[in-house]
Image: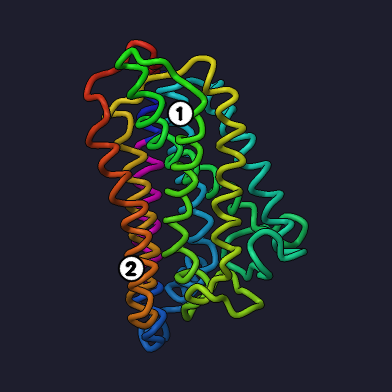
Amino acid sequence: MKNALYTAEQVCLIGHILAMAFGLAGLLLVVPHPEFILALPPWGQQLFQWSMANGGVVYIVLGALAIALHTYRHFGLGKLLGFLLPAVGISLTSELLGTSTGFPFGHYGYLSGLGYKIAGLVPFTIPLSWFYMGLVTFLFAYSGFISRPLREGKPLGFGAVLSTVGLGAIFLTAWDFVLDPAMSQTAVPFWQFQEVGEFFGMPYRNILGWTGTGAMFMGLAMITWWPKPVVVNRRQLITPLLVYLVNFAFGAVITLTSLDQRFWIPATLGFVLGVVPVTLLWWFAQTSLGKTAVDLR
């Protein structure tokens, strides 16, 4: 059972990365050269159309499954559900509000390519992406402000909770600095803002909306993670690190190759606020398994 879960996690992780690489190649190499598509046989053209229509669904679902299995194996079902339920519930609520009222992200709407839309507004994959990337960023912040004091025998105060929630939300928002331009302002958009954003096409309230939404569900998740804190070690952060770096790179490559040089600014800001501290937290995490951690492998 333990080996089967580990194998399933690795299959989902590899599939997640390959789906993103395939999508990146399609968006950057194939779409700009329609002659390549026209040269394909009918079945090849149908396959390409299917991949473009469903590729986003595949990589998000596989990413969510990989992180869910990883969390279950190492930290148990209680902590997995304790994060999954508020992450999906609050992010879906925020997205439904955003697409219908403009609060808290600004006025925007989803196009096609991300799957069935809940209430005709929000693709079902969007709350899943909030979940898996939110949990990834939460684990890194948790490793620094909860796990480190715990393994050093220091008391855990309310400041540790605030720091974990706040930093996790910042890491999540740093990813959006490359994701939003890539998904809304390039040749093949997946959503569109109905207003001209002040921050490289994004409204400033979109940044606040991302940070606030992430902080809300991470704060609720702490209710179930706090009573029995765990020591998160470096090995347990390898999969989250890969997922964060690959997802950041996906957005950054599309943004920096498809948009003008001004977008180096948000990409650099996202790198400094997200990639650098996340990598450092992984590096400084404990190298051996803590006594309070659960490993189902």
Question: For the point 68% across and 52% down, which residue is it?
Answer: 94
Looking at the image, tell me whether mark 1 or mark 2 is earlier in sequence order. 1
Label 1 Cα neighbours within 10 Å, binned few <14 / some 14-19 / many ≥20: some
Residue 274 percent coordinates (x, y):
36, 51
Give, as a three-letter code, the residue at label 1. Answer: Ala
- The residue closer to the viewer here, 176 or 124, is 176
Helix, strand or loop for disc 2: helix
Q: Main secondary structure of the magenta part?
A: helix
Residue 99 falls inside the magenta stretch: no
Helix, strand or loop for disc 1: helix
Q: How many marks?
A: 2
Is 268 on the left-hand or right-hand side of 66? left
- The residue closer to the viewer here, 146 or 237, is 146
Question: For the point 42% across and 31% down, which residue is it?
Answer: 142
Residue 86 percent coordinates (x, y):
64, 36
Give, as a three-letter code, the residue at label 2. Answer: Val
Q: Which mark is residue 193?
A: none
Q: Which mark is residue 253?
A: 2
Label 2 Cα neighbours within 10 Å, binned few <14 / some 14-19 / many ≥20: some
**In this picture, which residue range is highlighted in magenta?**
10-26
Q: Which residue is mark 1?
A: 160
Residue 12 falls inside the magenta stretch: yes
Question: For the point 36% across and 66% down, which residue is it?
Answer: 267
Is 186 on the left-hand or right-hand side of 204? left
Residue 170 percent coordinates (x, y):
46, 49
In the current view of this chain or complex, which residue is farthest to the bottom? 35
- The residue closer to the viewer here, 155 or 226, is 155
